[in-house]
Amino acid sequence: MSDALYRELILEEYKHPKNKGSVENPTSTCTKNNTLCGDKLTITLTVSDGVVTDVKFDGIGCAISLASASLFTEHIKGKAVAEIEQMDEKVILDLLGIELNPMRMKCAVLVLRAVAGALEVK
């Protein structure tokens, strides 16, 4: 896929995000901020028998951070916590499909940090 198509995907996810909102009666919640640009994400999730059964995000941010949150929350639904804990920024880059500079990378991995924080609380 070309960079232009990936950019369209990012804009579509930003405009029409999946899993936006909050989980009712979550087992874990975590909020993370990107102090460099002001992005802020709150993750709520439910874990049952070691599997993320529901996950949602809410917050404010740029197209990259919110598209990443949409794509990553969709990606981890139904996955084992142990598997999610092994995920790194490469997963985010694969989901986005484009190279990012270091500043934009901080925006993209905000969701990864928030999910990791929620899983630690669990």
Image: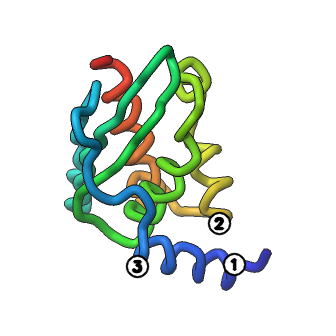
Residue located 57% across and 35% down the image: 78
Residue 1, quarter of the rendered image: bottom right
Query: What residue lies at 23% left-to-right and 47% top-to-bottom?
Result: 33
| Disc 2 secondary structure class | loop
Q: Amino acid at mark 1?
A: Asp
Q: Secondary structure at mark 3?
A: helix
Q: Which residue is mark 3?
A: 15
Q: Quadrant of the C terminus?
A: top left
Residue 40: x and y in percent read 23, 54
Determine the CA span between mark 3 and mark 1.
Answer: 18 Å
Say which residue appears at 63% left-offset and 44% top-offset: 91
Q: Is residue 22 left or right of residue 19?
A: left
**Residue, x 34% and y 19% (percent of image)?**
120
Q: Earlier in the sequence, mark 1 or mark 2?
A: 1
Q: How far across and how far down the image is residue 98, in percent? A: 65, 66
* Rendered view: 51 above or below 111: above
9 or 76, which lies in front? 76
Q: Are marks 1 and 2 in contact (CB under 8 Å)?
A: yes
**Is residue 11 or residue 37 the one in the foreground?**
11
To which quarter of the image does residue 58 belong? bottom left
Q: How many marks?
A: 3
* Marking on residue 98: 2
- Residue 3 circle label: 1
